[in-house]
Image: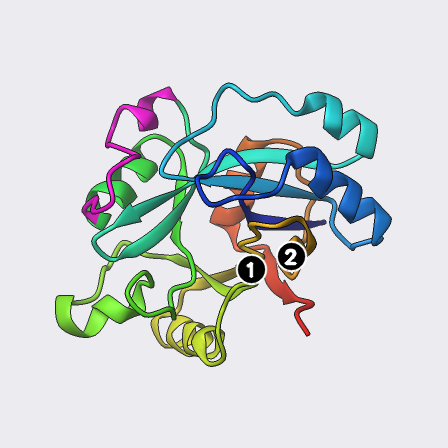
Amino acid sequence: MILDLHTHSIASDDGRAKVENYCQWIRKKELPLDGFVLTEHRQFDAASDYRHLEDEYGLLILKASEVETDYGHVLVFGVNDDLVNSFDFARVDNPIGEVLEAATRCGAVAAPCHPGRPNVGLFAHYENKGIIDEVALVEVYNGGSRPGEDELSEQKAAEFGYKRFGGSDSHIVSRIGYCATEFDDDITSIDELVGALETGRFQPRSWRT
């Protein structure tokens, strides 16, 4: 099962894609995606309901969040009420240790995204601030990466023994599916996604040209 784990819709301040348009594009272009995860910036969009689009297009549509920390951006899968109240999702400098601890305590998974990117990537901070022992999973394929960023992510992930996943980081419709994650098992809910990310039964995939 292939899911794009990192996408943004118009609910994000810099997103220009409607969720229905993502669905239409996936079907029109016959992309090898079974679904995608909306990871809106600095928030968790609990209100939106996309079940009618799931039924219409035969796609799994899940919701997560991209939060900002003092070690760069982090995707959080499995957001619930307890986690929303554990730290300020709108803050741009959350201590990464607090985010990782809260996610674990609340049954979620937190994973740095585009970690090879300057300034907003995890590894840009390792040399000056030190290594974060609680990190176990990072995004190594990102559809918006510049040359060399994914390569650095792969190199460092291997060095530290991190599990690896991929996501498009799409903000416009035509970029969804550039990168994604292939799972060994079927996933039908956010809880099953969290469980799968904990097991490591998946691999990053890239179709970026």
Residue at image point 56% right, 56% down:
167
Label 2 vs 1, first from the N-terminus:
1
Percent position of residue 149, x then y: 44, 75
Percent position of residue 125, x then y: 22, 67
**Where does label 1 land, which residue?**
166
Say what amino acid the circle numbered 2 marks. Arg
Q: Is residue 79 above or below residue 25?
A: above
C-alpha distance separating marks 2 and 1: 13 Å
To which quarter of the image does residue 52 belong? top right
Residue at image point 24% right, 38% down:
91
Percent position of residue 100, x then y: 28, 45
**Where does label 2 land, which residue?**
175
Say what amino acid the circle numbered 1 marks. Gly
Task: Say what secondary structure mark 2 lies in.
Answer: helix
Q: How is the image coloured?
A: rainbow
Q: Is residue 61 above or below residue 150?
A: above
Percent position of residue 200, x then y: 53, 55
From the viewer's perspective, tell me whether residue 182 is left or right of residue 27: left
Q: Nearer the viewer, mark 2 or mark 1?
A: 2
Q: Nearer the viewer, residue 49 or 60?
A: 49
Taking the magenta stretch, the answer to whether it contains residue 136 is no
Q: Is residue 206 above or below residue 96?
A: below
Residue at image point 34% right, 30% down:
106
Residue at image point 36% right, 77% down:
159
Image quarter of the C terminus: bottom right
Taking the magenta stretch, the answer to whether it contains residue 88 is yes
Of all residues, the one furthest to the left in this rendering is 129
